[in-house]
Image (cartoon, rainbow, N blue to C red):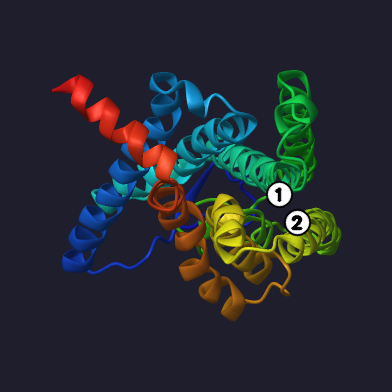
Amino acid sequence: MTVDNSTPVTEFVLAGLGNQADLQVILLLIFMLLYMVTLVANMLIMIIPNFNVTLHTPMYFFLYNLAFLDICYSSVVVPKMLINFMSQKKMISFWGCMLQIHFFHFLGSTEAILFSFMSYDRYVAIAQPLRYTTIMSYNVCFGLASCAWVMGFFHALLHTIMTAGLPFCGPNIVKHFYCDVKPVVKLACTDVSLNLKLLTRVTGTLTITTLMLIILSYIFIGKCLSKIKTSQGRRRALSTCSGHFTVVILQYGTAIFIYMRSSTNESLEQDKPAAIMFSAITPALNPIIYTLRNKDMKKALKKLLKISQ
């Protein structure tokens, strides 16, 4: 479906991930499974600390925020994708598209900022273990988390306003499986160089700044680890941040691949596999990574399973 060049666009068509009927069924089952894992695993991350007093620490406060973000983040993209797998017309309204852009960037940038605060939390836990709960008090944690949410919201609002203000008069086929800034602004019937520059520079600055803060935290963590004399002590300290480090690599590697490159038709096609990692796979992997690498979390999960029996 396309529209006449003189007609303002009221709906977009999402190109999706393919048109073969057999492939659609397979993808539907795969993404439905990933989404169920995302919902169940992240809800467990949010629930488990309530059953174990030892998990009432700043680390799990941030994990609660991360789990909630992952549920919302995946829900922005995956449910609509599942519906489109079962539909011939993969339509999304203009304002539905704008909302998807806003919440995708809102939740994604909030998560990036939260990761940098979590790295600082891990540094304090290793460098100042006796004063950890004092330095990272509830007020401090709540303030940092609130800062991440507010900054993420206004970062997304900039891109949403800039995109919604463009004139769209056809074609209306978004070459992606969800509405993102790059593939949508390419459809505008005006010069979009400013929008693409803002996307690269603002989102790029946010990504690089938070990444540099994370790297800085891990440099200081490395110095602290070098001062620990026993290998067992180093392993114990390292285990407290290994899950966070693994998730950061997955998340930032994908973000840099998508948003730090020039926008061409070829690059938009290459963005799809990375976007799948970003929106469907990583939210499902995050709670698994944190749970499998965390003895306290595994103990609390076993306790929760015993209570439910």
The residue indicated by pointer 2 is: 214
Give the camera-side residue of 286 and 8.
Answer: 286
Residue 129 placement (x, y as % from top left) = 71, 39
Q: In this view, does 29 lie above or below 43?
A: below
- Foreground of the two, 108 or 172: 108
| Tag 2: amino acid | Ile
Q: Can residue 183 be spotted in the picture?
A: no
Question: Can you tell which mark lies on residue 35?
Answer: none
**Most foreground residue, 22 or 217:** 217
Q: Distance between the residues labelled 1 and 2?
A: 6 Å
Give the quarter of the image for residue 65: top right
Asked if residue 233 shows in the view, the reply is yes
Specify few, some or many for label 1: CA neighbours under 10 Å numbering under 14, 14-19, or 20 or more. Answer: many
Asked which secondary structure carries label 2, the reply is helix
Residue 186 x %, y %:
67, 63
Residue found farthest to the left: 309
Q: At x 46% / y 55%, what residue is drawn?
A: 282
Give me the residue at 29% from left, 42% from top.
36
The residue that disc 1 covers is: 119
Which residue is more in the foreground, 227 or 22?
A: 227
User: The residue tagged with tag 1: helix, strand or loop?
Assistant: helix
Residue projecting furthest to the bottom: 266
Give the percent coordinates (x, y) of residue 100.
Answer: 56, 41
> For this view, does 3 lie left or right of residue 16?
right
Q: Where is residue 193 in the image (x, y as percent from the top left)?
A: 83, 64
Looking at the rendered structure, the kind of residue marked 1 is Ser
